[in-house]
Image (cartoon, rainbow, N blue to C red):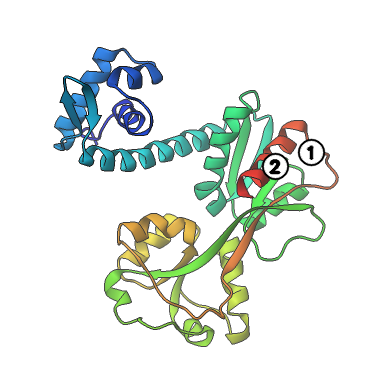
Amino acid sequence: MQDWPELPALGLLVTLSASAQSIGQAAEAMGLAQPNASRSLRNLERDLKVPLLRRSPRGTELTAEGHAVAQWASKVLDAYADLNAGTRAIQDDRAGTVRVSASLTVAEYLLPRYLTTFTVTHPDIDVGLAVENSAAVIAAVREQRCDLGLIESVSLPQDLPAEVVGHDRLMVAAAPDFATAWTTPIGAAALADIPLLVREVGSGTREVLDAALAQVGGASVAGEYASNSALKIAAATGLAPVVLSELALRDDFSARRLVPLPVQAGISLDRELHAVWSPGRRLSAGARALLEHMVRVHD
């Protein structure tokens, strides 16, 4: 990891690609001295062994390779922003003006992006985060241990108000070698006969899968884990196919660690992601602002 590019250098590259007309402008936008910015970019070219910049008497511009690297770098910076927002919220010693309890998939793949944009417009509102499965989130809301709960369950608790804050779907995925024998879409009955790697009972992901296969006897379980990462690692070894959120599988598909397996359209694996709260506890101004932000960003 000591050879990984430095974040300021990536930020300079992205700024040059997006708007800056010179290294000086990019440095100013990032609050850096121009000599330090130039040095960072030279080091980045050296470390990546890719020609990123074309220098001439007229100034400095990105090469074609530089533009490509800038696109990848922007994803790294977005991921770092998500990491920063999520970990700030989850710190145990952070009291949190707004207490949020979120299911694992929402906490991993959706909430950090919401928090990143929310804190820009509401820097005075702190958010504290607890990560649990959907059943535990609903319990926390009912017991008023949090202001907002974020769940991925199919069936909503009738006693709790709810708002849609996202959409998602489950996908079946497997290691590339495993997938070569699965080339045509299969139906619910055939899927129920195949041992699958699944989330634990009580998670929203498991509830969606169980509901989709309820009419054909439910899923056959090859392994059950409370961790999305553990499930993906097991699937990548070729142990069995895994059923997880498309959000959780996106990077693994891009890297070809896992590939999507076709299923028939009649299998209902789509779901809405909801915010829920206690009707016996009036939402604070901060909680209401966060809820409205999530709904607006989703729409």
In the image, is residue 81 above or below residue 60?
Answer: below
| Residue 257, position as x, y percentages in the image | 31, 61
The residue identified by callout 1 is 283
In the image, is residue 190 above or below residue 135?
Answer: below
**Which residue occupies 75% across, 53% down?**
162
Q: Is residue 263 left or right of residue 175?
A: right
Q: Is residue 224 visible?
A: no
Query: Disc 2 marks which amino acid?
Result: Leu
**Residue 273: quarter of image:** bottom right
Q: Nearer the viewer, mark 1 or mark 2?
A: 2
**Which residue occupies 70% across, 41% down?**
292
Q: Is residue 209 left or right of residue 174?
A: right
94 or 166: nearer the eye?
166
Numbered label attached to residue 291: 2
Query: Disc 1 marks which amino acid?
Result: Leu
**Dots 1, 2 in contact, CB < 8 A:** yes
